[in-house]
């Protein structure tokens, strides 16, 4: 019988293409990728051997029996091992290996062990194949054991593929089934018609299909950071959940990514993120790192790993307390680190993704174990986000005004505009809750424009000066201050409403001045050139840096409630308040005391000669109508 070689040569080309394509791929370091590599290499070995056997068995006179015996054994050993490697690959792909005992693996290896044993004995016993008197290669009875070996592993793979099909996407499930089909059917054909040699070729095509669907790099890698992406994370976490394999997720969330992009520039921010991703990826061999987008990274740690999640967290905390070098500048990136136990704390992929996507919340390093209460917090955040969107669309926000008391004039001469959001189901949503959410998702820009135009319209329609009010203050958020279009938008609005910017004070919180003084200063200078004036908000909340303030065009310093409340409780806090007011006066700045709630506080502040007082004791924030009435009533009355 003459064996045809054409299919084998084609198989060799296909397999070499697979090898080339696979090895060109960078960083396929997961066990599963290594499994695929073994599969490809064992298939390549059997392809080379089958070519050797075909050539030498077809030309028995031209090759020594020793050489022929070597390639024939080589082929049967590598070919039968391929089926075993494929079954192992399927097992790992499905995560089916995670809970198997060593005993299971030993039993699983028995068919291969029997096959190899028969092949090792074959040079002496000739049970598997032999050479007849004419030197022709012929099969012995034990060849059927080899066929059964291949069938066993292929059927095993088919069984777990079908049983655990939910763990795979449809395309992957079909890719595996096709591979199994093109591998199993030829075994049967080969068994019945030994001269039809399409098995190796069809298997090469099957492996190619697996490469293109299952081992698809573009699908699982983040194109920028070159580590596993969000899709890979969802897929791997689902796999472990379905197989009931416990694991821990460490999430590392960078704070204010949009802020860093706006200050460092997109390119530089990207390159430092690439560096971070590579650092996460190299943290521990068994720990996979994923880029889950928007500056959120995840590490997945299984219980059999040699490094504990706590150890990993402390390494990460240490690294992030140091600087990263970005475009020759040294930058410290605040991160929030948390740890999540699956399935003890969360047991569905939806819950995991809610927590992974949950935005950065604090300015401090945290490494606490997230409790599921945070889930309900997050659900509230989703609702508030929707409420903000709806309110922006339907112009359902409203602006309240809180009059500010002038100590010397003894009447209200200023006011602060404060946004309000009322939701039909949730009731009033406090700005302290929705402003940070709006800052994170960018809707603060729309809210800021809304408040600004409302104030402009109030100033246009009413001569507040007649009512004793000389200026209205508007709060600016960090995100607004860093927004390049802020100046342009404000300029358009004052032109449209024909408002004098001298009647508007912009309040900027102290934390913004500390975050990026250079960008802020340039924005402030442009706004100052238009005629706006500035108040420094929440002074004394921890970011104090008097030198910043001196360099920026603030006219008013608003002393935070906490300083005022403390001053009536302790003498040292009172001395602090006194010296702060005196220092500001020395610097030519006016002071506003926030949160004045009692007569005692008012008296103390009057005694310390604080310029303006704001608080519930003097006036509550009120809607526009009430505010106008209120101002009208008190415009000419000097109160004590
Ligand atoms: P803030 O700038 O410190 O505003 C003063 C806050 O203190 C207001 O809270 C006001 O209602 C409250 N307040 C006034 N007097 C008293 C008092 O005597 N005692 C106490 N305990 N509180 C008093 P509100 O309106 O809830 O606003 C909270 C924060 O939300 C504001 O703090 C501000 O940072 C932010 N915010 C409010 N409106 C806007 C806005 O239009 N844009 C931006 N970006 N932020 C806003
Ligand atoms: Ca304020």
Image (cartoon, rainbow, N blue to C red):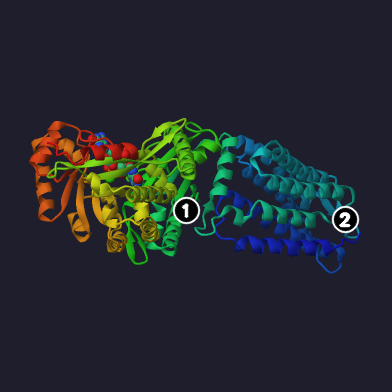
Image point (78%, 59%), residue name: 50
Q: Quadrant of the N terminus?
A: bottom right
Measured along the vertical axis of the image, is residue 318 above or below residue 64? above
- Please tell me whether mark 1 sits on a helix, a strand or a loop: helix
Q: Nearer the viewer, residue 201 or 466?
A: 466
Asked which quadrant contains residue 499, the reply is: bottom left
Residue topped by disc 2:
196
Comparing marks 1 and 2, which lies closer to the viewer? Answer: 1
> Does residue 398 appear to the left or right of 592 in the view shown?
right
Is 230 situated left or right of 591 in this image?
right
Residue 590 percent coordinates (x, y): 16, 51
**Observer-nearest of 565 and 418:** 418
The image quadrant in which ligand 2 is located: top left
Q: Determine which of the numbered discs, if any, sits on residue 281 in the image.
A: 1
Nearest the camera: 281 or 53? 281
Q: Position of residue 560 (x, y in %)?
A: 21, 42
Relative placement, left or right, of 514 versus 11 is left
Q: Residues at badges 1 and 2 in contact (C-beta under 8 Å)?
A: no
Mark 1 and mark 2: span between their CA atoms?
48 Å
- Residue at 41 percent across and 59 percent down: it is 261
């Amino acid at each position: 019988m003459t064996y045809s070689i054409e299919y084998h040569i084609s198989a060799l080309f296909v397999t070499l293409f697979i090898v080339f394509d696979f090895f060109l791929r960078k960083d396929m370091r997961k066990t599963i990728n290594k499994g695929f590599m073994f599969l490809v290499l064992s298939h390549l070995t059997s392809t080379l051997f089958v070519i050797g056997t075909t050539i030498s068995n077809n030309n028995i006179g031209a090759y020594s029996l020793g050489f022929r015996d070597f390639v024939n054994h080589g082929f049967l050993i590598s070919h039968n091992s391929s089926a075993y490697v494929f079954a192992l690959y399927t097992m790992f792909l499905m995560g089916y290996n995670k809970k198997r005992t060593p005993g299971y693996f030993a039993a699983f290896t028995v068919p291969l062990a029997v096959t190899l044993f028969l092949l090792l004995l074959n040079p002496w016993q000739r049970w598997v194949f032999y050479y007849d008197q004419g030197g022709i290669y012929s099969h012995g009875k034990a060849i059927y054991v080899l066929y059964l070996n291949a069938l066993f592993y292929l059927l095993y793979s088919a069984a777990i593929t079908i049983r655990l099909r939910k763990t795979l996407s449809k395309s992957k499930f079909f890719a595996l089934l096709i591979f199994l089909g093109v591998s199993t059917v030829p075994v049967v054909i080969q068994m019945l018609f030994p001269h039809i040699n399409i098995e190796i070729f069809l298997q090469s095509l099957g492996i190619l299909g697996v490469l293109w669907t299952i081992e698809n790099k573009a699908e699982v890698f983040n194109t920028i950071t070159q580590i596993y992406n969000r899709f890979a994370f969802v897929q791997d976490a689902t796999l472990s959940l379905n197989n009931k394999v416990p694991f821990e997720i460490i999430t590392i969330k960078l704070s204010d990514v949009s802020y860093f992009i706006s200050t460092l520039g997109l390119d530089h921010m990207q390159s430092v993120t690439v560096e971070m991703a590579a650092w996460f990826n190299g943290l521990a061999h068994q720990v996979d790192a994923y880029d889950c987008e928007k500056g959120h990274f995840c590490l997945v740690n299984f219980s059999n790993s040699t490094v504990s999640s706590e150890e990993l967290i402390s390494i990460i905390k240490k690294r992030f307390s140091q600087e990263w070098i970005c475009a020759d500048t040294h930058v410290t990136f605040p991160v929030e680190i948390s740890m999540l136990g699956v399935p003890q704390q969360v047991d569905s992929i939806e819950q995991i993704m809610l927590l992974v996507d949950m935005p950065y919340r604090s300015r401090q390093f945290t490494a606490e174990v997230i409790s599921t209460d945070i889930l309900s917090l997050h659900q509230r955040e989703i609702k508030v986000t929707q409420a903000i969107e709806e309110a922006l669309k339907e112009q359902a926000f409203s602006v309240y005004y809180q009059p500010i008391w002038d100590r010397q004039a003894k009447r209200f001469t200023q006011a602060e505009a404060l946004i309000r959001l009322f939701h039909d189901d949730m009731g009033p949503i406090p700005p302290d809750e929705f402003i940070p959410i709006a800052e994170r998702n960018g809707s603060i820009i729309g809210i800021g424009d809304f408040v600004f135009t409302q104030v402009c319209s109030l100033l246009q329609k009413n001569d507040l000066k007649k009512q004793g009010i000389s200026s209205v203050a508007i709060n600016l958020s960090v995100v607004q201050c860093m927004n390049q279009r802020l100046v342009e938008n404000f300029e358009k609005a004052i032109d449209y409403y024909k408002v004098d910017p001298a009647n508007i004070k912009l309040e900027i919180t102290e934390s913004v001045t500390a975050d990026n003084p250079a960008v802020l200063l340039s924005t402030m200078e442009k706004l100052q050139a238009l005629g706006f004036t500035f108040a420094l908000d929440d002074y004394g909340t921890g970011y104090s840096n008097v030198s910043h303030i001196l360099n920026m065009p603030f006219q008013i310093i608003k002393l935070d409630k906490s300083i005022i409340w403390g001053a009536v409780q302790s003498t040292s806090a009172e001395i602090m308040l006194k010296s702060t007011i005196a220092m500001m006066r020395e610097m030519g700045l006016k002071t506003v005391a926030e949160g004045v709630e009692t007569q005692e506080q008012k008296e103390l502040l009057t005694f310390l000669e604080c310029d303006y007082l704001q608080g519930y004791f003097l006036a509550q924030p009120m809607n526009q109508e009430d505010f106008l009435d209120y101002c009208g009533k008190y415009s000419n009355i000097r109160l004590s």
